[in-house]
Image (cartoon, rainbow, N blue to C red):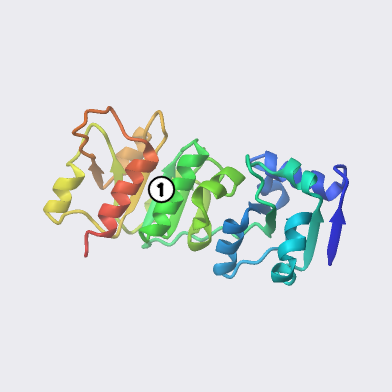
Amino acid sequence: MNDLITSRDNPRLKALRRLIQDPQAYRKQNQVWLEGDHLCRSAQAQGVLPRVAVFSQTLWLREGAQWADCAPETWVLTDDLFASLSSLESPAEMGWLLELPAAAKLAVDAPSVVLDRLQDAGNVGAILRSAAAFGFRQVIALKGTAALWSPKVLRSAMGAHFGLDLIESASADSLDLLQIPLVCTDVHAGPYLHELQRAAQLPSLCAWVMGNEGQGITPALLARADLRVRIAQPGGQESLNVATAAAICLHASATAAL
């Protein structure tokens, strides 16, 4: 079914607008908004299809034939109406509404990344990209972490969501169920990452913990760590951006067994 929508007051668009503007709205609506060709194709490549496909009128006239059967329901919006919905500087002209995927069950022996109260959506999305790239399929977001399925995290992750098992609002106590080493980054204590690599002592199967941008990892969570690791910074900076630190650590761990 294809509907041409021309009114800003259309009730379906009002619900979509709330979903786009409120990072927490996907939990209430049980829906996820993907904006842009890349995100939609990334979902499609993982076998994920939308409940509703939304297009600008210009894109639909140009490319509608290739998307005609991608969803049970299709909305075509006038170009200015689609642009008014978009959260991007340059509107992407298409988007998908998905049912919110079911939360993954904790796998006690899966290579994992634990997010401890990370606040910045860009950092969270970048870490999801690194997790997917380096084979850390399970991501455990502790309570207080930015919403994993919010539009900003989705854009930053560039499709990584659809290759990951995501657990949101987890408690720190749930980490006690893991049967793999818990490895924490710590700027003050522990051996250096490159020293562990050189001595072949860096675990490839583990759960890396990445802490809050300002406060780092909570002391209680640090106390649970099987290993604390520092990253050498010869340039003398006080600390690294958490997404950068995650990429360095995950790459080092993923290649430890190569």
57 above or below 13?
below
Q: Residue furthest left?
A: 199
Q: Nearer the viewer, residue 157 or 87?
A: 87
Residue picked out by circle 1: 114
Residue drawn at (69%, 55%) of the image: 94
The answer to whether residue 53 shows anywhere in this view is: no
Horizontally, residue 54 falls left or right of residue 120, namely right
Residue drawn at (36%, 62%) of the image: 109
Q: Quadrant of the N terminus?
A: bottom right
**The image quarter in which residue 231 lies:** top left
Mark 1: few/some/many CA within 10 Å (<14, 14-19, 20+): many
How far across and how far down the image is residue 100, in percent? 65, 57
6 above or below 40?
above
How far across and how far down the image is residue 72, in percent? 77, 68
Number of marks present in the image shown:
1
Horizontally, residue 193 falls left or right of residue 3, namely left
Residue drawn at (34%, 48%) of the image: 247
How far across and how far down the image is residue 66, in percent? 69, 70
How far across and how far down the image is residue 155, in percent? 55, 48
Q: Quadrant of the C terminus?
A: bottom left
66 above or below 122?
below
The answer to whether residue 50 shows anywhere in this view is: yes
**The image quarter in which residue 172 lies:** top left
Horizontally, residue 149 falls left or right of residue 238, namely right
Give the residue type at disc 1. Answer: Val
SS label for mark 1: strand
Q: Nearer the viewer, residue 64 or 24?
A: 64
Q: Nearer the viewer, residue 74 or 186?
A: 74
